[in-house]
Image: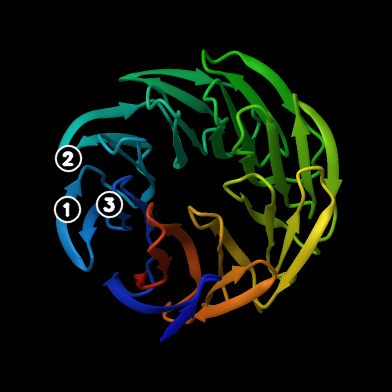
């Protein structure tokens, strides 16, 4: 089919990586774009070139919950419901990190790749420097997300206790942001290191903006929880995606004023991702579609997902988009 991406008509082709029926995966592209890491429910991680599985990494006993390449692609971190993190260099297992006592939800490398942050169902955040982990305690419920500031000097963590905690790179607690009334669902830092601007979305249906640990705006356009947030690469727009009965995308300016509404999905929006050049916003949904938007215009609907469209990730060159779904991973290639 032809695909309009705001700069002309492009051809689109798709590849399909089959998974066990009814199972999904977590995905992440290597920085050079050559390999797609696919973490599966059987505890293995496949490294794919197209639909060809170049390598299989076996280091976990249970389902993979997170995969994350560091910035230069020299290391891949994988985490699972077996409560451990495994570090890989190529196909070699170089370290096993044990510290969590609950399933691990997310991994985040610092921009310089020196520190790996993890969060889990044990209410803890751990900062790993090599194989040494520093446990950060403060949250009172499951910690579901961690995100480094663009400068890499501070870390934000969000949890089911409705709190955002800000930590220094050394593990000191800097601030607790507690204005959400229900669990956190998403956080995202503005890409400009000078802005020090954090966005958060909650189960309380709100989007909030924080600068220097003070709330500067509360945005209330969604009618349900806000599952995903994504800043455009130039930082001029924040996209927020609503869950369940909402199913809308709102675009916001950095001062919290509303820019526009993108309406098209018919069910909960799971994830939002801007293309590397900032021209196209991709959205995935439980309605089994991935939609591509240029400005306020929906340019195409991708309907190849065999089930709910969950995690989506652009290849670093912007010429491919991967989507994890129930029963398989779809990779759309643009040319």
Q: Secondary structure under badge 1?
A: strand
Q: Residues within 10 Å of mark 3 (few under 14, many from 20)?
A: many
Q: Nearer the viewer, residue 147 or 39?
A: 147
- Mark 2 — residue? 90
Q: Quadrant of the N terminus?
A: bottom left
Judged by depth in the image, the label closer to the viewer, 2 or 3, is 2
Is 100 situated above or below 35? Answer: above
**Residue found at x 70% / y 34%:** 197
Give the position of the C terminus as an image quadrant.
bottom left
**Sequence-earlier tag: 2 or 1:** 1
| Residue identified by numbered label 3 | 43
Give the residue furthest to the bottom.
Answer: 1
Q: State yes or no: discs 2 and 3 in contact (Cβ < 8 Å).
A: no
Say which quarter of the image contains residue 284.
Answer: bottom right
Q: Is residue 188 above or below residue 283?
A: above
Q: Please give left or right for residue 22 compared with residue 280 in the image.
A: left
Q: What is the spatial separation of the Cα atoms under label 2 and label 1, in whole angstroms?
A: 11 Å
Q: Mark 2 to mark 3: distance in Å?
A: 18 Å
As rendered, which of 263 and 223 lies closer to the eye? 263
Residue at image point 49% right, 75% down = 8
The residue drawn where x is 38% and y is 56% is 315
Residue 117 vs residue 93: left or right?
right
């Amino acid at each position: 089919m032809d695909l309009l991406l705001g700069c002309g008509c492009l051809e689109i082709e798709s590849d399909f990586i089959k998974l066990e029926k009814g199972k999904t995966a977590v995905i992440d592209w290597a920085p050079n774009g050559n390999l797609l890491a696919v973490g599966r429910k059987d505890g293995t991680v496949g490294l794919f070139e197209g639909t060809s599985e170049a390598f299989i990494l076996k280091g976990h006993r249970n389902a993979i919950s997170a995969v994350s390449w560091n910035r230069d692609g020299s290391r891949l971190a994988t985490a699972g419901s077996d409560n451990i993190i495994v570090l890989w260099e190529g196909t070699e297992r170089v370290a096993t990190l044990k510290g969590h006592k609950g399933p691990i939800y997310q991994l985040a490398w610092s921009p310089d790749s020196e520190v790996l942050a993890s969060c889990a169902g044990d209410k803890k955040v751990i900062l790993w420097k090599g194989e040494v982990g520093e446990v950060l305690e403060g949250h009172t419920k499951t910690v579901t997300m961690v995100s480094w500031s663009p400068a890499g000097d501070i870390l934000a963590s969000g949890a089911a206790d409705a709190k955002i905690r800000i930590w220094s790179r050394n593990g000191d607690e800097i601030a607790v942001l507690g204005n959400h009334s229900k669990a956190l669902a998403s956080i995202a830092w503005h890409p400009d290191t000078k802005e020090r601007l954090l966005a958060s979305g909650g189960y309380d249906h709100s989007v909030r903006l924080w600068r220097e640990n003070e709330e500067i705006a509360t945005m209330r356009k969604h009618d349900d929880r806000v599952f995903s947030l994504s800043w455009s690469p130039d930082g001029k727009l924040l996209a927020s995606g609503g869950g369940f009965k909402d199913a809308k995308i709102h675009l916001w300016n950095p001062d919290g004023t509303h820019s526009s509404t993108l309406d098209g999905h018919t069910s909960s929006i799971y994830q939002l991702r801007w293309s590397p050049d900032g021209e196209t916003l991709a959205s995935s949904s439980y309605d089994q579609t991935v939609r591509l938007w240029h400005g306020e215009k929906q340019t195409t609907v991708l309907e190849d997902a065999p089930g709910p469209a969950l995690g989506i990730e652009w290849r670093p060159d912007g010429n491919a988009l991967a989507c994890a779904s129930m029963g398989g991973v779809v990779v759309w290639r643009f040319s």
